[in-house]
Amino acid sequence: MRRIYCYRHVAFVLLSCSCHPALSLSPFGGNNLDKGFNILETASKLIPQGQIVNTAKESWKFAWRRMMAELAPQDKNGSYSRPSYTFEGRIGDKTFPDEHGRYHLFVGNPCPWCHRARLVVSIRKFTGQEIGVTQLVDDPVKASRGGWIFGPSSPDPISRSKDLRELYEFLSPNYEGRCTAPLLVDRKKNKIVSNESADIVRMLELANFGRDGNGGDNGPLYPPELASVIDETNSWIYEKLNNGVYRCGFATQQGAYDRASSDVREGLHRANKILSRQSF
């Protein structure tokens, strides 16, 4: 379960391959050798090779950690710290009335946070006329920020943006946070309601979008008699499993990774214990 980066092992393999004819990394063969930029051979006449290797290693580590910190904010111990957001709207209040066809949901299949929003839409049997849904495409190469773009079969119905960052900018000018999904938007006001999946799920559970009562769906998803159990279960599943795997993947120090990995194993053990006596 340990994730350790050992540059000496990598260097040994590279040196072994370059010195052994049968394992040569050169694509040319014979005397026509690919010697890269010849940095070590040239610079080592002036600077010890160890300094060159350590400088390259530390520069790569610095660039990697800076990139990781931008993708996933870190605390001083190298642990992923999920950012909070300022979009705290609620469907059903004076700002965002519960109306037929007023809201639009942007989701992406690779995202587990989007899954639960999609599940509520499906279980409640909402139609596209009651709430619009657009499927995002995960393509960080084409995205101007983050990874979500709009594909040819699922264009942005609000501003014809090319990716989610452009849509965020249109809906909330000068926004500087992460451009995440799911995203719930008020189409009348062109305003973001929320990009927090837990809040969106609760709103979709309570909203009717012009229906008479809760007709047409499969009953309440948050019944009062089970509310305390649901809240308690959601709390540890989020911390140990849902967010735990993110903390594993985004950890930049071994200790942070070990703590996150321990939480995931604890969460899996707890879930397995519950599932051994019931099917949900």
Image: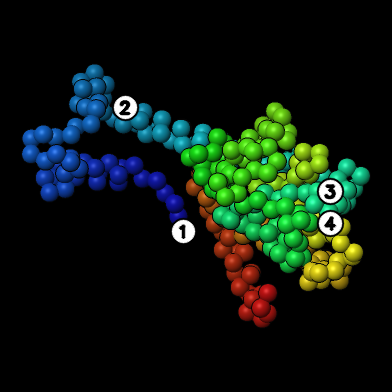
Depth check, front residue: 1 or 217: 217
- N-terminal label among 3 and 1: 1
Q: Amino acid at mark 3?
A: Arg
Tell me the residue that label 3 is attached to: 90
Mark 4 / mark 2, whichever is N-terminal: 2
Which quadrant holds residue 120? bottom right
Residue 51 - label: 2
Residue at 60%, 49% in the rendered image: 154
Q: Which secondary structure lies at badge 1?
A: loop
Residue 86 location in percent, x, y? 76, 39
Q: Farthest residue toward the right?
A: 94
Q: Earlier in the sequence, mark 1 or mark 2?
A: 1
Say whether residue 226 is visible: no
Q: Name the element at disc 4.
A: loop
Q: In the rendered image of this protein, does residue 71 appear above or below residue 212?
A: above
Alpha carbons under labels 3 and 4: distance apart? 13 Å
Tell me what residue is drawn at x 71 percent, y 64 percent.
122
Q: Position of residue 251 (x, y in %)?
A: 53, 46
Direction from residue 15 to residue 142 in the image, left or right: right
Contact between marks 1 and 4 (CB within 8 A): the answer is no
Local SS, label 3:
loop
Front residue of this view, candidates 244 and 51: 244
Amino acid type assigned to the residue bearing label 1 in the image: Met
> Which secondary structure lies at badge 2?
helix
